[in-house]
């Protein structure tokens, strides 16, 4: 179970159930004890009333009152009984409710005046609660010990206990529900800072913030501070790595330029073969340097982008620059970009992607270039079309590869589409390069509304 909410709720249910069950048992026991005391008090009262009306006849025989203190003593097996034993006179007198049954009182003797309680087997196989007391009463031949026992059916106390338990059960269930709801409310309030951390981290991922800001509870603040330090160190490390890669590539460009000049000098001296080889090596290395420079500028993962790209703004700026080039000023540019369209790609990366596609189209177009960008349900689509010669079908799969040049007479290193392909891989974009049926070339890029983090292999 990996959810804190589920753990807390289940723990709360178990704890509340245990506590309320224990409390219910305690309440039922308290009620049963109280009820038992009331029954014992009632039995004591019956014993005292019986003791007050017992008489001895002149011959020493016990005389029992004809009118008992409670009518239940008259009903056979009615649930309330009395029994008087005269050990000296060998007499035993019982209430009418006992009918033909004799209470099996213990045979051991008891001190006079001390109350004793038993649970014995009674009429009809039912247990009875018995209260007994030995009294010393005046008789014609002197004082005699008399055992007076009063009993009541035990199921009266048991039924009262069960009835009380059933009566409080609905209230216990309502109390349990209230306690669980209060626990859930406490959990919701207590975990709100963690939910806020999640929202703030999402804002950092979406580049709407650079750190976790705001005041957090004292218990959570250390975690927030550590996360901010981690974000800061990660950003600094990535920037340092990109700067070092860029510095390394720039540092190699100067020796390559010198190598190119040396090749030119050798060619003037008649060393054409060596000069061509040096030119080829310099061009290959310079192509690699340019490629690494471009890769160093690409954001390593979508989560580290500086923000979302404004498609209309970047396309307009790029087309405006290309229109001032020798190839772009002779072309008819058709721009159809939806207003307020943005995609979850770093603005620099989108500028690199769109710029390379537009430069490629400008390089090969004859008369016109059509650019469209629209948003559909769940994704946005950028399409760049030209009316150039297109690409032979067998060469289409090779276009995204680094260094592929269809025409050596055209300027460049064959890196544009390779860079576009790498940006598409970072952001999990769908890149389609194909010939148009009516002639020309089409490049299409699909941008999902939600882009997961992916770090391309180096």
Image (spheres, helix red, strand yellow):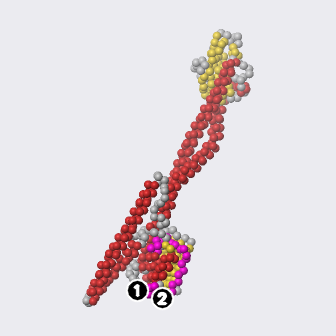
Q: Is residue 163 left or right of residue 398?
A: right
Residue for point 55% across, 76% down: 339
The secondary structure type at the circle numbered 1 is: loop
So how many labels did they put on this image?
2
Residue 279 found in image quarter: bottom left
Residue 251: x and y in percent read 32, 75
Q: Is residue 317 above or below residue 181?
A: below
| The stretch drawn in magenta includes residue 130 | no
Can you identify the residue that label 2 sits on?
Answer: 330
Instruction: Give the camera-side residue of 445 and 317.
Output: 317
Instruction: Give the camera-side residue of 334 and 8.
Output: 334
Which quarter of the figure is the C terminus placed in?
bottom left
Residue 265: x and y in percent read 27, 86
Residue for point 48% across, 88% down: 330
Instruction: Give the camera-side residue of 202 and 26.
Output: 202
Badge 2 density bin: few <14, some 14–19, many ≥20, Cα 10 Å:
some
Residue for point 41% across, 60% down: 229
Can you identify the residue that label 1 sits on?
Answer: 410
Q: Is residue 148 above or below residue 457?
A: above
């Amino acid at each position: 179970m990996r959810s804190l909410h589920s753990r807390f709720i289940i723990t709360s249910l178990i704890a509340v159930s245990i506590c309320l069950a224990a409390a219910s048992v305690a309440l039922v026991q308290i009620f049963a004890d109280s009820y038992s005391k009331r029954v014992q008090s009632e039995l004591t009262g019956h014993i005292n009333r019986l003791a007050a009306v017992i008489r001895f006849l002149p011959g020493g025989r016990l005389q029992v009152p004809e009118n008992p203190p409670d009518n239940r003593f008259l009903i056979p097996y009615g649930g309330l009984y009395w029994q008087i034993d005269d050990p000296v006179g060998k007499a035993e007198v019982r209430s009418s409710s006992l009918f033909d049954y004799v209470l099996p009182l213990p045979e051991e003797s008891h001190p006079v005046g001390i109350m004793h309680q038993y649970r014995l087997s009674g009429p009809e196989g039912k247990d009875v609660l018995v209260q007994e007391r030995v009294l010393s009463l005046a008789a014609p031949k002197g004082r005699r010990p008399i055992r007076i026992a009063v009993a009541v059916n035990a199921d009266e106390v048991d039924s009262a206990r069960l009835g009380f338990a059933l009566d409080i059960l609905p209230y216990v269930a309502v109390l349990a529900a209230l306690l669980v709801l209060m626990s859930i409310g406490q959990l919701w309030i207590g975990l709100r800072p963690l939910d806020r951390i999640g929202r703030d981290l999402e804002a950092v991922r979406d580049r709407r913030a650079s750190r976790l800001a705001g005041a957090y509870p004292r218990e959570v603040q250390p975690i927030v501070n550590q996360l901010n330090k981690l974000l800061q160190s990660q950003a600094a490390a990535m920037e340092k790595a990109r700067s070092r890669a860029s510095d390394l590539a720039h540092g190699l460009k100067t020796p390559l330029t010198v190598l190119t000049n040396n090749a030119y000098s050798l060619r003037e001296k008649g060393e054409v073969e060596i000069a061509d080889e040096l030119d080829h090596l310099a061009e290959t290395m310079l192509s690699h340097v340019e490629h690494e420079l471009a890769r160093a500028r690409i954001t390593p993962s979508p989560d580290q982008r500086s923000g979302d790209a404004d498609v209309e703004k970047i396309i307009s700026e790029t087309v405006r620059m290309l229109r001032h080039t020798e190839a772009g000023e002779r072309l008819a540019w058709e721009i159809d970009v939806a207003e307020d369209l943005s995609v979850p790609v770093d603005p620099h990366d989108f500028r690199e992607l769109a710029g390379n596609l537009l430069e490629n189209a400008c390089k090969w177009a004859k008369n016109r270039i059509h650019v469209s960008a629209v948003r559909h349900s769940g994704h946005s689509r950028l399409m760049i079309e030209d009316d150039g010669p297109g690409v032979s079908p067998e060469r289409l799969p090779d276009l995204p590869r680094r260094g592929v040049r269809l025409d050596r007479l055209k300027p460049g290193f064959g890196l544009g589409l390779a860079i576009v392909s790498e940006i598409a891989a970072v952001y999990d974009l769908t890149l389609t390069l194909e010939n148009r049926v009516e002639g020309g070339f089409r490049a299409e890029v699909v941008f999902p509304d939600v882009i997961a983090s992916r770090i391309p292999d180096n």
